Image (tube, grey):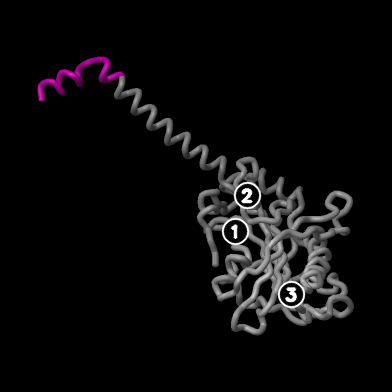
C-alpha cells in the first residue's frame, strides 16, 4: 500500500478530505434545521365537538350520537357522528348522518382520513356515481357564500341499509375548504403552514329512489350548510389561534408532526 500512504500525505488529499467532512457536517446541520422549519405544530380545537348544539341543525330531529367508542377507528378523540331525522323537507330520505372529524398534530403525526369512495368499498359497497356539489353557506357570507363538496353515490349488493346511499363530504384546513383529500394534503404540507389543523365533514343519506339523487343531495346540502358555519364560528380554531400556535417554539408546543408522516398516514 505504498501508493496509498504517499497519497494520504499529499496536501490535495488532506484538503479534499477536510472539505468532504465539512460538507457532511453541513448537510446534517442543514437537514436538521430544514426538518425543524418544516415541522408542523398542533392547533387545539377551540370548543369540543361533543358540545356542539344539535338545535343548530334545523329541519332535522337529533336522535343520537353514534360515535361513542369509535376513536380508535377514526384516529382522533375529537369527532361526532350524529343520526338525524328530517322533519320538514326531504323526509323520503328517512335519516341523515352527520360526521365531523378533527385532526391536528400529535406524536403519531397528522392523520388525513380516507374518503368514502375508499373506505366504503372495503365493506363491499360499489360506487355508482361521483361528482361535486355546491353547498350554500349563508352563515359564512359574505366571505364564503358556498363551498364545493364531493358526493359519492354507492350501493351494496346484500346490505339493505346501504342499498342506495349518498355521502357528501369536504375537508377544512386552517379555515379553507377543499372537496378532495389530495388538495387538503397539499395544503397541509405547504412549508409556510407552520401550524395546522384538518377536519373532515360529511353527511350520509339514503337515496329514496333510482331517479331521486337530487333529493338526497338536497338533504346533504341542508345539513352541511348549517353545520359548517356552526363549526367555523364556535368550534374550529380561529386565525388568531393558528397564529399563536405558529409563533410557539417547537419545545413549547409539546408535540408536532412532519409532512412525511402525514403523507404516509393512511388510517382505515
Residue contact at pointers 3 and 2, CB within 8 angstroms: no
Horizontally, is 187 left or right of 219 in the view? Answer: left
Against 222, is 29 above or below?
above
CA distance for labels 3 and 1: 23 Å
Q: Residues within 10 Å of mark 1 (few under 14, many from 20)?
A: many
| x, y percent for residue 43 | 67, 54
Name which quarter of the figure residue 137 lies in: bottom right
Q: Residue visible at 70% across and 69% down?
A: 167
Disc 1 is placed on an element classified as loop
Callout count: 3
Name which quarter of the figure residue 25 lies in: top left
Disc 3 is placed on an element classified as strand
CA distance for labels 3 and 2: 29 Å
- Residue 64 lies within the magenta run: no
Q: Which residue is mark 1?
A: 112
What label sits on residue 205 in the rendered view? 3
First in sequence, mark 2 or 1: give its number: 1
Location of the N terminus (image quadrant): top left
Q: Which residue is mark 2?
A: 188
Amino acid at each position: 500500500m505504498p501508493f496509498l500512504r504517499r497519497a494520504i500525505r499529499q496536501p490535495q488529499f488532506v484538503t479534499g478530505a477536510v472539505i468532504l467532512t465539512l460538507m457532511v457536517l453541513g448537510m446534517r446541520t442543514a437537514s436538521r434545521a430544514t426538518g425543524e422549519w418544516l415541522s408542523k405544530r398542533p392547533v387545539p380545537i377551540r370548543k369540543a365537538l361533543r358540545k356542539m348544539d344539535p338545535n343548530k341543525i334545523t329541519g332535522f330531529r337529533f336522535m343520537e350520537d353514534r360515535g361513542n367508542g369509535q376513536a380508535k377507528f377514526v384516529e382522533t378523540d375529537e369527532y361526532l357522528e350524529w343520526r338525524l331525522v328530517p322533519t320538514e323537507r326531504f323526509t323520503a330520505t328517512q335519516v341523515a348522518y352527520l360526521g365531523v372529524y378533527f385532526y391536528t398534530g400529535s406524536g403519531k403525526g397528522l392523520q388525513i382520513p380516507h374518503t368514502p369512495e375508499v373506505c366504503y368499498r372495503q365493506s363491499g359497497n360499489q360506487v355508482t356515481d361521483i361528482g361535486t356539489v355546491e353547498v350554500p353557506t349563508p352563515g359564512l357570507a359574505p366571505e364564503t357564500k358556498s363551498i364545493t363538496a364531493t358526493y359519492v353515490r354507492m350501493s351494496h349488493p346484500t346490505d339493505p341499509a346501504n342499498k342506495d346511499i349518498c355521502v357528501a363530504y369536504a375537508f377544512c384546513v386552517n379555515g379553507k375548504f377543499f372537496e378532495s383529500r389530495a388538495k387538503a394534503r397539499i395544503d397541509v404540507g405547504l412549508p409556510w403552514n407552520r401550524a395546522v389543523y384538518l377536519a373532515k365533514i360529511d353527511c350520509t343519506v339514503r337515496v329514496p329512489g333510482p331517479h331521486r339523487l337530487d333529493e338526497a343531495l338536497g338533504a346533504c346540502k341542508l345539513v352541511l350548510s348549517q353545520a359548517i358555519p356552526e363549526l367555523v364560528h364556535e368550534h374550529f380554531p380561529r386565525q388568531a389561534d393558528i397564529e399563536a400556535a405558529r409563533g410557539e417554539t417547537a419545545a413549547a408546543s409539546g408535540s408536532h408532526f412532519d409532512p412525511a408522516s402525514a403523507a404516509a398516514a393512511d388510517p382505515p
